[in-house]
Image (cartoon, helix red, strand yellow):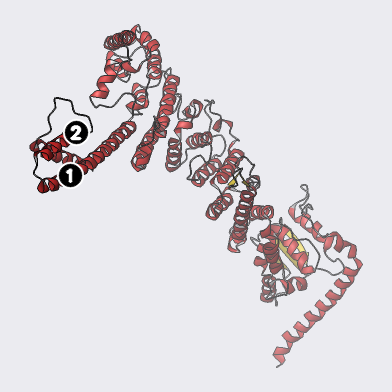
Amino acid sequence: MPHQRGPLLWTIAIFALNTICLTKMAKEVHHHQHLQLGLCLSPQSSDKPHPQLSLAKSSRQRCSEWIFRDVPSDITLEVNGGIFSLHKFPLVSRSGRIRKLVAEHRDADISKVELLNLPGGAEAFELAAKFCYGINFEITSTNVAQLCCVSDYLEMTEEFSKDNLGSRAEEYIDSIVCKNLEMCVEVLQQCENLLPLADELKIVSRCIDAIASKACAEQIASSFSRLEYSSSGRLHMNRQAKCEGDWWIEDLSVLRIDLYQRVITAMKCRGVRPESIGASLVNYAQKELTKKSSLWNPSSQTKVDLLAGSNGHEKLVVETIVSLLPVEKLAVPINFLFGLLRSAIMLDCTIACRLDLERRIGSQLDIATLDDILIPSFRHAGDTLFDVDTVHRILVNFSQQDDSEDDMEDASVFESDSPHSPSQTALFKVAKLVDNYLAEIAPDANLKLAKFMVIADALPAHARTVHDGLYRAIDIYLKAHQGLSDTDRKKLSKLIDFQKLSQEAGAHAAQNERLPLQSIVQVLYFEQIRLRNALCSSYGDEDPKPMHQSWRISSGALSAAMSPRDNYASLRRENRELKLELARLRMRLNDLEREHVCMKRDMEKSNSRKFMSSFSKKIGKLSFFGHSSSRGSTSPSRHSYRTDSKVIERTCASTE
């Protein structure tokens, strides 16, 4: 027993000393009420140290403003370079971590403790210490994340004290922050420096879910506000009305890229409109990437020195935004996609990132402009001025996408009465765009013939109804590369269909000395045919088709101005007309059979010659193909009737 009295007496002495300290603190609190009221913090107040003072001195200075000077401190805590001279009892009563540290060093009379890696640093610990001392301060969206993390680090939970700092901060997040989108964004900003602890405490996930839910609800409410009744009494959505549900786009642009990615992904899962997602991505990219003006300037051809400064952040932003792009077409402007592609090439992003952009651009290339596809070459000075390889891959994507849509579309599309299907119109636009692009890159002295030809030959033959643009581009290339051999000139000339040249272009080509002699002869030949057709049409009553066009169509070959899709539609219409004609023939054949049965019954009842003569007259009046027979024509024999019936049956079977 005597050996146990020492620790017991020591504990009683410590308790008495703490009681005396608390009494003096209470007197000091009553004496300094004005100080307590002045420490109620607001979001605008700043506790940051003066830049001229060191972190340790500023911490002591701030601590001396609210600590009780009458009671000498018995413990010193060092937090990330900041030093706080405090008292054990207020800290031990709220913090489980500090209680354990004091209990472990009870015999050694610990007086200095270093708290390593405390989340939020000295500022967060100062707020936690104020809470332990009972000093009032305001919990706001700018400090609640720090309070949650520091309370978890210091173990300020309900296990050690009722209504502790951890439970109060959690309650503020659930009841205040998660109901306001702007406050959620502010908390996420604070969490950027508190990861991964803020993620483990589910602060980040709760704020992200709240933002996604709030944005989706705002969008649904905005959609309902745009509903109105038309003049006919039907309910429809007014698309001209401004959508007010996307005000959050500007707020999200302040987030770091990793948190922004998680927010957009959550919004996609909640069903936020692709147009709103695209608008947010455009706004975020413009803020993060416009620091390098050449990334978004299509006409800029200056080489950027990527070694000057770090480009890791820009590269991460581009790759992340590309991965977040909606799958729907026209969700983002095509010039934005080209801007991302230029950035991806400059920053040497992953191949998958660039191929994804090329595929997206290829799917809507028909709305692109010449400035869009003039992508500068960023590799080295000895290369071409423009990135021809990237444009070629985009054209391949466009052609493959067009072919795949041809296979997947329903047959009703081909049965439309429109002269050209939408994809044919897109082909015409892209062909004109390619011809202008070829004319723009043709003067480049470093442009190889193979690259020029692969761009010119990337589209199918039916994409160009007129070859004037292609002829102009080839003529510019021949003028800029006068050292080409005759073989290379012939290869270039074979790309031109001289039948599709206009009268002005044909006249220019007939006198163009840069073309091979064989090409000039072809031009003169087709000009002769065109002149002959013009003379024939001027003397004839009707307007005949040109000789070469009528021969193409009558022979069954593809027309020069018709795509395989249009020819297929024409064949389907002809097939449908044949089926209708065969159906009419079947009906006439059934009527004839019924008439024949009736006549046969009448013949069995009456064998008079008068009835036979009337039967022969009826048979003569019936025409199998619906045309009135001539006077000298005879009725078909039984053998020919059977033969025609078999032919019709075979025709119907083959058609069906």
The outermost residue toward the bottom is: 1
**Kind of residue at disc 1:** Glu
**Kind of residue at disc 2:** Lys
Q: In which quarter of the image is residue 151?
A: bottom right
Where 493 falls versus 462 (above or below)? above
Instruction: Bin the neighbour count of mark 1 within 10 Å (Cα to Cα): few under 14, some 14-19, many 20 and up.
Output: few
Residue 334 image position (x, y, % from top left):
51, 35
Q: In this view, does 528 lie to the left or right of 347?
A: left
Report which residue position mark 1 lands on.
593
Nearest to the observer: residue 623 or residue 159: 623
Q: What element carries label 1?
A: helix
Report which residue position mark 2 lands on.
621
Q: Which quarter of the rendering shows the C terminus? A: top left
Q: Is residue 649 left or right of residue 425?
A: left
Where 507 falls versus 494 (above or below)? above
Residue 13 image position (x, y, % from top left):
79, 82
Where 517 falls versus 551 (above or below)? above
Q: In which quarter of the image is residue 6?
A: bottom right
Q: Which residue is drawn at 13% across and 48% down?
A: 601
Residue 584 image position (x, y, % from top left):
25, 39
Residue 521 image position (x, y, % from top left):
27, 9
> From this viewpoint, is residue 400 visible?
no
Q: Quadrant of residue 67?
A: bottom right
Nearest to the observer: residue 66 or residue 420: 420
Nearest to the observer: residue 539 or residue 632: 632
